[in-house]
Amino acid sequence: MKPAFKRILLKLSGEALMGEQSYGIDVNVAKAVAEEIKAVHELGVEVAIVVGGGNIFRGVSKSAGNMDRSSADYIGMLATVMNAVVLQDALEKLDVYTRALSAIDIPQLAEPFIRRRAIRHLEKGRVVIFAAGTGNPFFTTDSAAALRALEIKAEVIFKGTKVDGIYSADPFLVPDATRFEKISYREVLEKQLKVMDASAISLCMDNNLPIMIFNMRDSGNIVRAVKGDLSIGTIVTVDGKTQTAS
């Protein structure tokens, strides 16, 4: 089956690289994620990635304490750079040409983010990893994913999480929570569903950029999503009427 998309942006949380650990990076998980990305790349899909840093430090977490929010957010951005370098290494060990682009200037570790350069890397068949969020405090990596996806003209955002879609409530706390197959941006905002932060959802809604939420921990799901298998998660669109999973 041919891929349904030519250029995608994959949003990976820092927790996705944590595995079963309570902190840090599990290199075996990074390798498994890299293998899935390679499988998508071999389909001829142009792949860009935004990686979070929650496995190391999060600006609004308890570990930040009473630290100034801006300072805490900058530390969180540095955590995303660490994750980007780990993922880049895992991909290059699989012979996938990869470029890390950072919104914070760290030339020894990553190229500076330049939109046209990022697009050129994609056109040349390289996987591009965007690090350091937007480069600004008070913006999450969800907002960075929406922003970068629009800048590179990605056709869709794939957000890999630990659940298989969007639910009416936290399925880990509410066992009988309803899973949605399709839902609109407006409903996500109105119901205050914990999918992405409100600014990211609004940005996608204003620019008609679809979001696919799926379980990152199920092997092969990234490939399935790229091939257009919408049954593995929840798709968020402008006019998508709410449809619950049967």
Image (cartoon, rainbow, N blue to C red):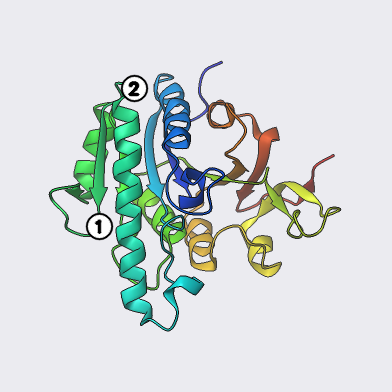
Above/below status of 153 relative to 186:
above
In percent of width and height, residue 26 lies at 45, 41
Q: Residue at x 38, y 34 (%)?
A: 47
Mark 2 vs mark 1: in front: 2
Q: Within 10 angstroms of label 2, few (less than 14), some, or many (20 or more) residues?
A: few
Left or right: 81 in relation to 51: left
Residue annotated with mark 2: 94
Marker count (numbered): 2
In percent of width and height, residue 134 lies at 32, 61
Figure quadrant of the C terminus: top right
Q: Residue at x 39, y 57 (%)?
A: 144
Q: Amino acid at mark 1?
A: Ala
Q: Amino acid at mark 2?
A: Leu
In percent of width and height, residue 239 lies at 65, 52
In percent of width and height, residue 28 lies at 45, 33
Q: Residue at x 67, y 40 (%)?
A: 233
Question: Which residue reaches farthest left?
Answer: 107
Above/below status of 124 relative to 119:
above
Q: Residue at x 62, y 46 (%)?
A: 162
As helix, strand or loop, the secondary structure at mark 1 comes to loop
Figure quadrant of the N terminus: top right
Say which of 60 and 41 sits in front.
60
Left or right: 95 in relation to 111: right
Left or right: 224 in relation to 180: left
As helix, strand or loop, the secondary structure at mark 2 comes to loop
Say which of 14 and 231 sits in front.
14
Give the number of the disc on residue 103: 1
